[in-house]
């Protein structure tokens, strides 16, 4: 793979948009920064300065400039929940969650004991993420430690900020996909020591979901979290009514699904839950009070017929909830966060609410960084943050081009991109200031 490195420092001249506050709290207009003629100065992989071109340029008279026209520079997109091993089976027809897992997912995941195969899929997955403008993702691997080694090695080679973990699963799956409470703990710990904090990589403790872990394994996962408190925990919560009933039968002594995780010390800051669709009032309160994060996966929830995420309730119980959007491929139907923003809009409409483009944009950038506790490093265009940036082509297709001609303001521009845009809209991608998708 050949990567073009701009000699640093250098500047990107382009219109840009970024959040600098939470629009669910501060309102859309107070949260969005838009520069119609912006300059972003990049040095040593970081954003050194950002502002209006005419104000900033005199401070850097020698600076080499790359210019993009008919384009919008935004922070690299962040996918808060995705399964890289499921990319080969994306778009598998006709089942809901439990049958879909059994029929397609568990079959596919068995191939990842082969590190060569895992590496090929990881390479394909990361290239597809970058094509879509996604520069960071919280990634589920498989039960095999090799699947994590392959993924992190591929991420390291590209210099990406990525989070990932070995799935913990010691029951209710094919024998070839099971570990034990002890081996799951030991393998996860070895992977944490090998990869966590190396360059821009972070480990995530990853029990798949309550039904595929025994109480002993959940207890071990909680012990691992206590031993490594700066490591993220990621799992699934309340995706499908049949799954919720299953959890109730497996853990009859617990008050509800989330209480299972709480009991084993798997709620709180740095714990991120995918889906969270069928929650009772007590679960919403527990999510909010514990400071846990949510990954909202709208295309996946539609594809598997799982349900409609209740963003209004999430925000009413905690306006500052750490909440990001996610593709959840392979149940999700796209790696494009633009399309995922559009799908979140559709879900909100089906619940009777219109999601503003600024809020959707927040949940794919700054809000997603907050959900992963990475807001000090990525998610915005601001001095000191890592230069993970995407150049959106505002005329990517004839339909978009004619619609953009009618656009009156930046909110409308963002809306057109999230409703009509996809991988074709991504003209260039920078990761830590390095071009990882060819610049023009
Ligand atoms: Zn998932």
Image (tube, rainbow, N blue to C red):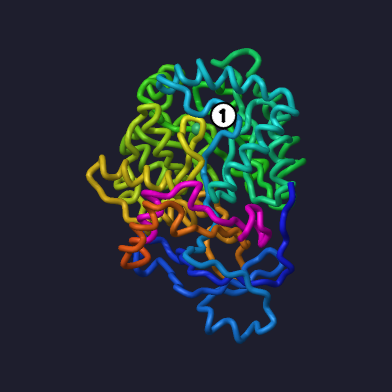
Mark 1 neighbour class, 10 Å CA radius: few under 14, some 14 to 19, many 20 or more: many
Vertical arrangement, residue 82 with respect to residue 3, above or below? above
- Residue 240 occupies which quadrant of the picture? top left
Q: Quadrant of the C terminus?
A: bottom right
Query: 46 or 41, which lies in front?
Result: 41
Residue segment shown in magenta: 413-440
55 vs 419, left or right, is right
Determine which quarter of the picture holds residue 59. Answer: bottom right
Rendered location of residue 87, percent (x, y): 57, 31
Outermost residue to the left: 352
Q: Residue at x 57, y 44 (%)?
A: 129
How many numbered marks, from 0 up?
1
* Helix, strand or loop status at disc 1: helix
Image coordinates of residue 1 in percent, x first then y, are 74, 46
Q: Which residue is mark 1?
A: 86
**Residue 402 located left or right of residue 212:** left
Residue 113 in percent (x, y) is at 71, 23
Residue 275 within the segment the image draws in magenta? no
Q: Nearer the viewer, residue 94 or 253?
A: 94
Front residue of 186 and 375: 375
Question: Residue furthest toward the front?
Answer: 398
Residue 249 coordinates in the image, percent (x, y): 41, 17
Q: Disc 1 beta carbon < 8 A from ligand 1?
A: no
- Residue at the (69%, 70%) spot, across then down: 43
Q: Residue at x 75, y 28 (%)?
A: 116
Instruction: State left or right for residue 346 relative to residue 320.
Output: left
Towards the viewer: 363 or 65: 65
Q: Is residue 63 visible?
A: yes
Residue sitting at the far top: 175
The relative height of residue 246 versus residue 151 in the rendered view (above or below) is above
| Residue 420 on the magenta segment | yes
Whether residue 252 is visible to the viewer of this picture, yes or no, is: no
């Amino acid at each position: 793979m050949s990567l073009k490195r701009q000699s640093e420092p250098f500047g990107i001249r382009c219109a840009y948009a970024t959040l600098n506050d939470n629009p669910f709290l501060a309102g859309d207009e107070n949260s969005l920064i838009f520069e119609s003629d912006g300059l972003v100065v990049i040095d040593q992989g970081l954003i050194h300065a950002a502002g209006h071109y005419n104000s900033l340029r005199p401070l850097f008279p020698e600076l080499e400039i790359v210019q993009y026209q008919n384009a919008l520079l935004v922070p690299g997109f962040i996918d808060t929940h995705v399964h890289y091993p499921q990319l080969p089976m994306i778009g598998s027809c006709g089942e809901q969650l439990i049958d879909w897992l059994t029929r397609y997912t568990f079959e596919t995941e068995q191939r990842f004991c082969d590190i060569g195969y895992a590496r090929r899929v990881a390479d394909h997955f990361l290239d597809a993420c970058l094509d879509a403008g996604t520069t960071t993702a919280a990634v589920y691997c498989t039960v095999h430690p090799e699947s994590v080694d392959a993924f992190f090695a591929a991420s390291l080679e590209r210099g990406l900020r990525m989070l990932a973990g070995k799935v913990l699963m010691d029951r209710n799956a094919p024998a070839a996909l099971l570990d034990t409470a002890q081996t799951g703990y030991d393998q996860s710990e070895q992977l944490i020591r090998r990869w966590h904090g190396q360059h821009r990589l972070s480990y995530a403790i990853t029990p798949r979901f309550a039904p595929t872990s025994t109480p002993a394994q959940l207890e071990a996962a909680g012990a691992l979290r206590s031993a490594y408190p700066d490591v993220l925990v990621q799992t699934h919560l309340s995706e499908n009514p049949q799954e919720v009933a299953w959890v109730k039968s497996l853990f009859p002594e617990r008050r509800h699904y989330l209480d299972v995780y709480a009991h084993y010390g798997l709620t709180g800051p740095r714990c991120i839950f995918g889906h969270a669709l069928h929650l009772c009032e007590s679960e919403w309160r527990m999510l909010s009070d514990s400071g846990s994060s949510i990954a909202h996966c709208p295309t996946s929830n539609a594809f598997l017929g799982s349900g409609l995420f209740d963003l209004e309730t999430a925000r009413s119980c905690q306006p500052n909830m750490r909440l990001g959007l996610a593709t959840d491929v392979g149940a999700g139907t796209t790696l494009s966060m633009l399309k995922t923003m559009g799908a979140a809009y559709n879900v909100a409409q089906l619940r009777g609410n219109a999601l503003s483009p600024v809020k959707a944009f927040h949940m794919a950038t700054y809000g997603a960084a907050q959900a992963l506790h990475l807001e000090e490093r990525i998610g915005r265009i601001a001095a000191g943050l890592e230069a993970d940036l995407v150049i959106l082509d505002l005329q990517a297709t004839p339909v978009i081009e004619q619609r953009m001609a009618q656009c009156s303001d930046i909110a409308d521009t963002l809306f057109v991109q999230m409703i009509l845009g996809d991988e074709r809209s991504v003209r260039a991608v920078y990761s830590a200031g390095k071009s990882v998708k060819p610049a023009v």
